Image (tube, grey):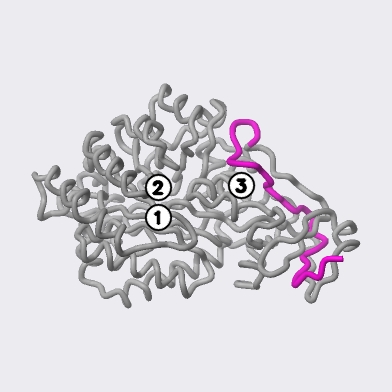
């Protein structure tokens, strides 16, 4: 008999998302549903999963939670966020509504550089305070693990300051954070017209400095680069990623958001854990992704936030046998959205994903997109007990309903973290 700390029982549907690795192709439609399901938790880990009568026959629990009429599933994993920043860009949103294009605003000194100026001026304490409020909202909407990028410093001092803010938030907040260095997010104003010199700074000073000062006991630290029109060329992106790989960073890439430069192909070649955005990725590179271990990460909140009509071609990726994940791309310029629930709703409507595929993309596949698929993203024995109880009778209500929070309770590492 298992002496459990917590037994969540009688769920209308318990979604296990059990998988040996990221789900691909047709397997993305498989949720591992257990009707009238239960999950037992001991020492912060999942001890047993199954139909309620079977689990009750093997478990006694110090505490029980009745999930009758509700859906129980893994906590959401958000594998692409710009969580830490100062200020806002509401004025730019108004400009876009009036017809200004994102790249036009960026070329005029707005966009990313606007947030860079605010973030450089902020203290670590201010960054932590502002970002904590966003992290609280993420948790309330069901996110239990998230990636968090730098990239609003674009100098050594501020990039390290952002990483310190991420470290403090990870230490004090229930949501687990995975850090990503994104020094190559944009060419800062002081390097305009000298992009190669800025890449020299990233490769020769920033990467070694960050590697020497930052460690993350929970996971690998990643390096990302924005390979796209108005950001970094394919050759510059290769320099950054190859230097990062040589130092032991895991690799990610922003690419194909505005124009295809070959970034998806580069991600596959270098063994990146993920390639993100992929709005205009050519068919031959989609096939390469599908045959690789690199996970495609779609960010439907970003084209929605920009009022654009082009989204990541999810159907082509899935039907080619690829592994697809979803993320919020939480950021102050194009997608200030803390809710993975809303991202799932967008994915079903504008990317033609089924409800099951979208849930897979927001849990187990998202976990693999940050190297944590062995720890979180599914309800399997031995994994962290990161569990959502949703106030819905059927998983299809998750994308069907939007604009409200469907989370009833969030359990993080076996402890009630939010109601």
Marks 1 and 2, how far apart at CA: 6 Å
User: Which comes sooner in the sequence, label 1 or label 2?
Assistant: 1
Residue denoted by label 3: 359
- Left or right of 30? Residue 78 is left
* Quadrant the N terminus occupies: bottom right
User: Which comes sooner in the sequence, label 3 or label 2?
Assistant: 2
404 or 48, nearer to the observer = 48
Give the image quarter of residue 323.
top right
The numbered dot on residue 221 is 1
The residue segment tinted magenta is 1-27
* Element under disc 1: loop
Picture residue at 50% right of the left edge, 49% below the top: 371
Residue denoted by label 2: 250
Q: How busy is the neighbourhood of tag 2: few (under 14 within 10 Å), some, or many (20 plus)? A: many
User: Which comes sooner in the sequence, label 1 or label 3?
Assistant: 1
* Quadrant the C terminus occupies: bottom right
| Residue 226: % across, % down | 29, 44
- Left or right of 4? Residue 194 is left
| Residue 304: % across, % down | 42, 46
């Amino acid at each position: 008999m298992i002496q459990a700390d917590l037994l969540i029982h009688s769920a209308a549907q318990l979604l296990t998302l059990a998988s040996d690795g990221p789900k691909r192709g047709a397997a993305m439609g498989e949720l591992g549903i257990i009707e009238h399901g239960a999950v037992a938790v001991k020492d912060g880990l999942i001890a047993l999963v199954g139909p309620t009568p079977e689990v009750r026959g093997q478990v006694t629990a110090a505490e029980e939670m009745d999930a009758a009429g509700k859906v129980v599933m893994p906590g959401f994993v958000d594998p692409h966020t710009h969580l830490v920043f100062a200020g806002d860009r509401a004025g730019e949103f108004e400009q876009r509504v009036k017809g200004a294009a994102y790249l036009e605003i960026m070329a005029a000194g707005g966009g990313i550089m606007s947030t860079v100026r605010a973030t450089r001026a902020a203290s670590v304490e201010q960054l932590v305070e502002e970002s904590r409020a966003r992290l609280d909202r993420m948790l309330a909407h069901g996110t239990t693990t998230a990636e968090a990028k730098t990239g609003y410093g674009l100098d050594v001092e501020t990039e390290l300051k952002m990483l310190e803010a991420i470290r403090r938030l990870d230490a004090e907040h229930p949501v687990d954070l995975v850090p990503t260095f994104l020094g190559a997010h944009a060419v800062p104003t002081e390097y305009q017209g000298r992009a190669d010199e800025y890449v020299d700074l990233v490769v020769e000073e920033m990467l070694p400095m960050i590697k020497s000062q930052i460690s993350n006991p929970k996971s690998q630290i990643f390096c990302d680069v924005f390979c796209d029109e108005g950001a970094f060329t394919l050759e510059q992106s290769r320099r950054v990623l190859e230097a990062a790989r040589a130092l032991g960073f895991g690799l990610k890439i922003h690419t194909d958001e505005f124009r295809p430069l070959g970034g998806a192909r580069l991600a596959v070649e270098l063994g990146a854990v993920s390639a993100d955005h992929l709005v205009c990725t050519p068919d031959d590179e989609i096939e390469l992704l599908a045959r690789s271990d690199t996970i495609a990460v779609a960010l439907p909140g970003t084209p929605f936030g920009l009022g654009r009509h082009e989204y990541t071609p999810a159907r082509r990726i899935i039907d080619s046998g690829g592994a697809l994940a979803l993320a919020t791309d939480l950021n102050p310029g194009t997608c200030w959205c803390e809710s993975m629930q809303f991202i799932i709703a967008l994915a079903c409507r504008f990317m033609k994903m089924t409800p099951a595929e979208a849930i897979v993309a927001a849990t187990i596949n998202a976990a693999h997109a940050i190297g944590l698929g062995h720890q979180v993203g599914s309800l399997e024995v031995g994994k962290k007990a990161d569990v959502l109880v949703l106030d819905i009778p059927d998983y299809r209500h998750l994308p069907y309903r939007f604009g409200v929070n469907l989370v009833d309770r969030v359990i993080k590492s076996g402890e009630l973290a939010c109601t």
